[in-house]
Amino acid sequence: MEITIPTNEEIETRIATLIAETELAAFATVSADGLPHNSCLHLAGIGTTMYFSSWQYARKYTHIKNNSNVSIELHTDLPGGFADRDKMKSLQITGKASYVTDLEEMDAVIQANYAQHSFLKEFDVLSSFKRVLTGAIPLEKIRQRIIRVDPVEALYTDNSVFFMWRNMISFDQDGHVSEMKPYPGDLPSGVPAMEE
């Protein structure tokens, strides 16, 4: 069977699709004493940029204000369990977090959330942001914040290429895949390493 390795552009599309199709992700921040703190958060994506919401009293809010380095893990759900392992895709991202203050970006994030998560029609956790957008209340007066995560690098696994196909992905400042390298020592026997 011939193996076709995806291009950078194809990888970027696959990553953006995985982000858009994922409801929950593990989101890790770093405390002031250098310890990791992990949360499970709802995720919305616009391209390879990821968005989460948080309360200002949450630990992650303070962690991000002091250290913008974050790590996120997300993966496909496999309804058939191990039998569907050939469809598994996962992403372990290191990125830079910031808080969204631009109203146009905030509106785009809200729309992406509604498009990606139908439960928001019944349980709207973004209603305070909608009040900010209409001018009913200033952003400084609400206790929620939208977190933007710009990817820096990632370990991307895609078993649809071949089982355990993993690559290190680098992103440029606009969130585009700029480089892809095989994960060191992870190629199955008989599969040649890609030339640089």
Image (tube, grey):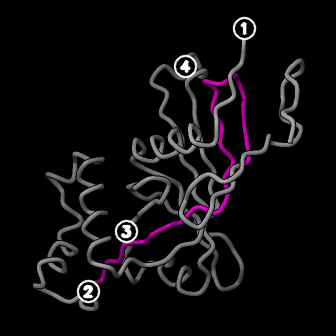
Q: Is residue 147 magenta?
A: yes
Q: Earlier in the sequence, mark 3 or mark 2?
A: 3
Q: Earlier in the sequence, mark 2 or mark 4?
A: 4
Residue 168, horizontal then vertical, whole percent: 73, 48
Q: Earlier in the sequence, mark 4 or mark 1?
A: 1
Q: Earlier in the sequence, mark 3 or mark 1?
A: 1
Kindly identify the residue that appears in the image at 50 percent across and 79 percent down.
59
Give the camera-side residue of 7 and 53.
7
Q: Is residue 95 magenta?
A: no
Kindly identify the residue that appears in the image at 41 percent across and 63 percent down.
51
Which residue is tagged 4? 84
148 in relation to 62, above or below:
above
Give the camera-side residue of 14 and 21.
14
Q: Which residues are magenta?
A: 143-168
Which residue is tagged 1? 1
- Horizontal side of 150 relative to 171 (left or right) equals left
Q: Earlier in the sequence, mark 1 or mark 2?
A: 1
- Horizontal side of 127 relative to 148 (left or right) equals left
The nearer-to-camera label among 2 and 4 is 2
Q: Quadrant of the N terminus?
A: top right
In contact (CB < 8 Å): disc 2 and disc 4? no
Which residue is tagged 2? 139
Separation of residues labelled 3 and 2 (CA atoms) = 14 Å
Q: Quadrant of residue 158?
A: top right
Residue 62, horizontal then vertical, whole percent: 51, 84
Separation of residues labelled 4 and 1 (CA atoms) = 19 Å
